[in-house]
């Protein structure tokens, strides 16, 4: 029984090691925010409902690659990071709002 448990743990470790995990550096976060800001400054990329139009994230990706050519981030990774940054921003904004508990 112990041998099969070791084998299962080894298989799990191999699976985790073969999956490529992209980590975002603070510099890449800054570049992402800069790219989104640049896109908004260009104008014409926001729909009436406040969302980005089709092709906007591809343009953000292109801007990121212009600023940092070694950047390996592509649309799914950018979407995921934007969701996380949006959640973090909402939490900080809520803490700093006038209705906050005074923390």
Image (cartoon, grey):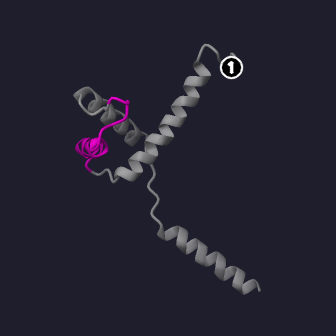
Furthest-front residue in this view: 48
Q: Few, some or many C-alpha atoms within 10 Å of disc 1 (few <14, some 14-19, many ≥20)?
A: few
92 on left or right of 3: left
Where residue 12 appears, as percent x and y from the top left, is 60, 73
Furthest-right residue in this view: 1
Where residue 51 appears, as percent x and y from the top left, is 37, 34
Residue 53 sits in quarter:
top left
Q: Nearer the viewer, residue 84 or 71?
A: 84
Q: Secondary structure at mark 1?
A: loop
Residues rendered magenta in the picture: 48-69
Q: Nearer the viewer, residue 55 or 86?
A: 55
Q: Residue at x 33, y 54 (%)?
A: 72
64 on left or right of 8: left
Decide: is 96 above or below 82: above
Q: Residue at x 24, y 28 (%)?
A: 43
Q: Which residue is mark 1?
A: 103
Where residue 79 appears, as percent x and y from the top left, is 41, 46
Q: Nearer the viewer, residue 65 or 70?
A: 65
Count of labels shown?
1
2 on left or right of 22: right
Where residue 89 appears, as percent x and y from the top left, is 51, 30
């Amino acid at each position: 029984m112990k041998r099969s448990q070791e084998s299962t743990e080894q298989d799990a470790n191999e699976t985790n090691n073969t999956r490529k995990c992209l980590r975002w550096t603070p510099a890449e976060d800054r570049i992402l925010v800069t790219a989104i800001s640049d896109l908004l400054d260009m104008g014409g990329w926001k729909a009436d409902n406040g969302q980005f139009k089709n092709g906007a994230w591809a343009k953000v990706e292109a801007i990121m690659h212009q600023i940092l050519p070694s950047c390996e981030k592509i649309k799914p990774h950018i979407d995921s990071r934007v969701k996380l940054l949006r959640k973090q921003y909402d939490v900080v904004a809520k803490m700093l709002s006038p209705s906050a508990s005074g923390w």
